Image (tube, helix red, strand yellow):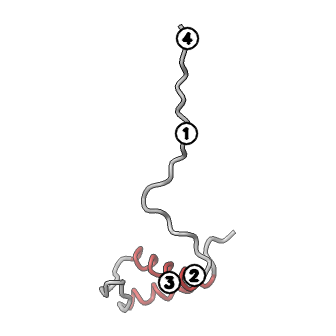
Amino acid sequence: MAKYGKAAQKNVKSTMHRRKKGTLKSGSGRKVKSRKQAIAIALNESRKKGAKVPRKSSGGRKRSTKRSTKRSTKKR
């Protein structure tokens, strides 16, 4: 199953063209030079429009599963 919808793909494509042309700006108003930042902007815009885009990851760390740490006590 595809992760991203057609609308999101079109938005990323147009955003990359805007970056190459030099007209893409970040939230602070500066020109975007980074490819990764341009893709992040495009996916964020797509999410707001309601396109099929996976949820944002919660930063650089992954969730760790909780393990029960029961100590086994031996009778002596």
**Cα separation between marks 3 and 1:** 38 Å
Q: Amino acid at mark 3?
A: Glu
The residue drawn where x is 58% and y is 70% is 54
Q: Nearer the viewer, mark 4 or mark 2?
A: 4
**Which residue in the structure is indicated by mark 2?**
9
Q: Amino acid at mark 1?
A: Arg
Question: Is residue 35 toward the left or the right of residue 9 in the image?
Answer: left
**Which residue in the structure is indicated by mark 4?**
75
Give x and y (percent) for residue 56. Answer: 51, 69
**Which residue in the structure is indicated by mark 3?**
45
| Neighbours of disc 1 within 10 Å: few (<14), some (14-19), many (20+) | few
| Helix, strand or loop for disc 1 | loop
**Which residue in the structure is indicated by mark 1?**
67
Q: Amino acid at mark 2?
A: Gln
**Cα separation between marks 2 and 1:** 39 Å
**Mark earlier in primary sequence (1, 4):** 1
